[in-house]
Each structure stands twice: as C-alpha cells, then as structure tokens.
C-alpha cells in the first residue's frame, strides 16, 4: 500500500495477493512491484544475451525473461543463468521438453501457456520439473492466442474469454498440486487488457503480471503502457510489470520505473521535474535536462531535482524538490537546496555543479541509511 497521511489523495490501496518467489525476488503480497524486461538477442548466443541481461539489471530490472524456442537456447541458458545478476524467466510457447530443460538449466520461472504444452501427462512432467528445481510458473494468457474453443464460445477475444482461459490453466496446475504461479492476461488493446486484468483480479488471489503486449515503438508503446498499466496500478492491481516496446530492453526498464515512480509505488534514481521551456527561459532547458539525464543515470538513490527555465514556476517547484535550479538572471540562475534559496550559479557551470550536488546528496542519503541500520 502506498500511504500518504499528509496528502491522502495520493494513496493507492494494493490488491491483496498471495506471494511467490521468482528466484530471490518476491512477487505479490506486500513485496515491491517488480520491473521486468525481455531480451531480444538470439538466446543461443550466450555472450550477447548475458551482456543484454547485465545492462538491463544495471538499469534496474528485477527480473529478465529470455525466449527458449529450441534446444540450442536451453543449452545456452545454463551459462546465462550463471552470469545473470537477476532471476531469469524462460519463455516457453509449445514444446514441453523446452520447459523441462529450462528448469534443469536453472531458470527461476517458466512462462508457459499450459493449454499449449500438450496433454495432462506433459503438463504433469513440466510441473514435476518446476517442483524439483524450485521454479515458479507464469501462466501467460494472450488475446492473440486464445484457445479455439473459447473463440468459438465467445466469438472474439474478450475479457471473459481471457479470464476463463487463465482459470482453466490454473486448474491444470492446481490439479498437480502446484501453487507457485502468477498470471498475465495481455492484449495489445488497452481497453481489452484493462478489463481482463480487472476481472482476473477479482477471480483469483494469484500474483498478477501486468503488461500491454505488442504496445509498439518507443513513443507509442510508452503512451499505451502508461495508460494501461497506470490505470491498473492506480487501482491497486499488479505485482510485477513489463513494458513491451519495439526498443532496447533497457528502455523498457526505464519506462517501467517511471510509471511506478509517477504513482509513488517505487523509488529509484533521480526524478527530474522540468518545464517544457518557452521564450522566458534563462537557459536551454531541453539540452540541460537531456545532459543531466545522461550524467545522472548512474545515481540509484531516490531523490528529486527541479530544472525550471524562469522564475514564474521555478521557486514553487523548488520548494518540493531536494535540489533545484531556476533561470532568471543574466547568464546565471538560482540554486535551491531542500526548497530554499542557496546560491547563484552561472549557466556555463550549471550542469557540472548540479551533478556534483546530486552526487553529494545521494552520498549523504546513503550514509544516513547505513547509520540507521
């Protein structure tokens, strides 16, 4: 639950779900909402895949998924798991043997559609492998690949069909006395996905993996994901998220965190509050913010920074941030610390100075945390 007693209109009451483990990452219950991404390398190329996994982890990914469509991929998986700093989910679509191989290779979770695995005996073999190797399972329902009998029953992909599919798959696992599972009900249509997730949240206490599948390129996919996931997270639904973009997986992680940060559900790194700039700006706001985003990407400590081009809104925004800079003077601006005017700084030296201030503040925050432990 995100509780703010001073500003209760910011409160989000999270749906109560049971908790499972994906490797060493708790999902559901009162655990933080985890951020996932998926590699787009050829999984059989272990070196390239490991490099991408590590970059995603540095960006903040809690969990990374890799596709394992063939034996070459599951062979490479053992090395990938060994070198990964975060739990690895193996994405299985059809062949049950790939799921067994992935479990044996050390995958922390298997993403499967039990209805595509085959008969009950094959599902039982996958479940046995998951139990033997400590894997959890994600039941992955997708509007684009619903079972034929459900499409015949409902006529088209709809929330009811997606939830029915999910619950049928839940029964397959529960019949094998397996309960370490989470569920996703993804669609590229924001309305369909949101309605399916809302119904799913009422039908089960399983942890829910949120995503708007095939959302599109960086801009369009970010917008669709922010609308769809933001709407659900705001209503308390969702235990782990993946933003699906036709872009670098690192960008998926960044967008996922920004969605969570905007709702106060996760806090990581520097949140920059900046104006869109106009003729009143006392310095080039857009170039400054772009430079600061790059220069401050390594800072993981949660803190806020306001960069405002003029004195119309600058002082007010600075009141609410840890560090602020407001333009207005000739070739110089005002630096704010903890909401109060501190000192003037030239525009020329501004970026370097702000980076120094942020790094110093981050060190101060981390030192205080260490002293409190």
Image: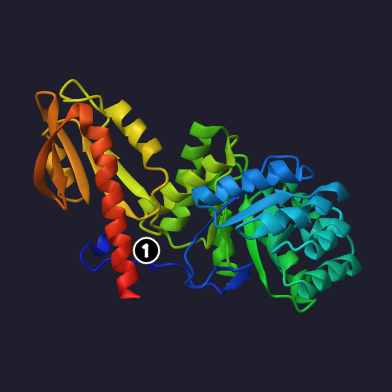
Determine whether, in the image, residue 321 is placed left or right of residue 343. right
Residue 345, image quadrant: top left
Q: Of all residues shown, which one is farthest toward the bottom? A: 177
Look at the picture and state if 197 lies above or below 130. Answer: above
Q: Relative to 236, does residue 261 appear above or below in the rendering?
A: above
* Rendered image quadrant of residue 197: bottom right
- Quarter that holds the N terminus: bottom left
Q: Residue at x 31, y 49 (%)?
A: 359
Q: Where does the image place residue 61, in percent across and percent down from the top left?
A: 54, 53
Q: Nearer the viewer, residue 96 or 225?
A: 96
Q: Secondary structure at mark 1?
A: loop
Q: Residue at x 21, y 23 (%)?
A: 278
Between 218 and 88, the one lying in front of the other is: 88
Query: Residue 214: percent from the left, percent from the top?
Result: 62, 40
Task: Depth check: give the residue in front, 278 or 51.
Answer: 51
Q: Nearer the viewer, residue 220 or 145?
A: 220
Circle 1 residues within 10 Å: few <14, some 14–19, many ≥20: some
Question: Is residue 19 toward the left or the right of residue 9 in the image?
Answer: right
- Residue 201 locus on image (x, y percent): 55, 65
Q: Which residue is mark 1?
A: 12
Residue 37 position, x and y percent, is 59, 49
**Considering the image in quadrants, where does the C terminus appear?**
bottom left
Q: Can residue 140 be seen at all in this image of the molecule?
A: no
Residue at screen point 47% across, 45% down? 254
């Amino acid at each position: 639950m995100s509780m703010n007693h001073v500003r209760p209109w910011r409160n989000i009451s999270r749906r109560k779900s049971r908790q499972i483990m994906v490797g060493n990452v708790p999902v559901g219950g009162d655990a933080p909402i985890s951020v996932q991404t998926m590699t787009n390398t050829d999984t059989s190329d272990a070196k390239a895949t490991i490099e991408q996994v590590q970059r995603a982890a540095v960006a903040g990914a809690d969990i990374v998924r890799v596709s394992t469509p063939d034996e070459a991929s599951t062979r490479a998986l053992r090395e990938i798991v060994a070198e990964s700093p975060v739990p690895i989910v193996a994405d299985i679509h059809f062949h049950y043997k790939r799921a067994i191989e992935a479990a044996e290779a050390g995958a922390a979770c298997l993403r499967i559609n039990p209805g595509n695995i085959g008969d009950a005996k094959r599902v039982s073999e996958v479940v046995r492998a998951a139990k033997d190797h400590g894997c959890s399972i994600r039941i992955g329902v997708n509007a684009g690949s619903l079972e034929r009998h459900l499409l015949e029953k409902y006529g088209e992909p709809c929330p009811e069909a997606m939830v029915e599919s999910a619950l049928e798959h839940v029964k397959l696992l529960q019949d094998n006395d397996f309960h370490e599972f989470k569920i996703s009900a993804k669609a590229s249509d924001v309305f369909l996905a949101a309605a399916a997730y809302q119904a799913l949240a009422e039908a089960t206490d399983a942890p829910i993996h949120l995503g708007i599948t095939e959302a599109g390129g960086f801009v369009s996919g970010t917008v669709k994901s922010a609308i769809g996931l933001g709407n659900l997270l705001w209503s308390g639904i969702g235990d782990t998220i993946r933003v699906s973009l036709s872009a670098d997986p690192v960008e998926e992680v960044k967008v996922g965190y920004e969605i969570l940060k905007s709702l106060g559900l996760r806090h990581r790194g520097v949140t920059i509050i900046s104006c869109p700039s106009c003729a009143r700006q006392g310095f080039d706001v857009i170039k400054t913010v772009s430079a600061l985003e790059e220069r401050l990407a390594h800072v993981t400590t949660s803190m806020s920074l306001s960069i405002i081009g003029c004195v119309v809104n600058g002082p007010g925004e600075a009141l609410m941030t840890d560090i602020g800079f407001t333009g207005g003077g000739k070739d110089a601006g005002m630096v704010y610390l903890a909401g109060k005017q501190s000192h003037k700084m030239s525009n020329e030296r501004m970026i370097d100075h702000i980076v120094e201030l942020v790094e110093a503040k981050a060190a101060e925050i981390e030192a205080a945390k260490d002293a409190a432990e």
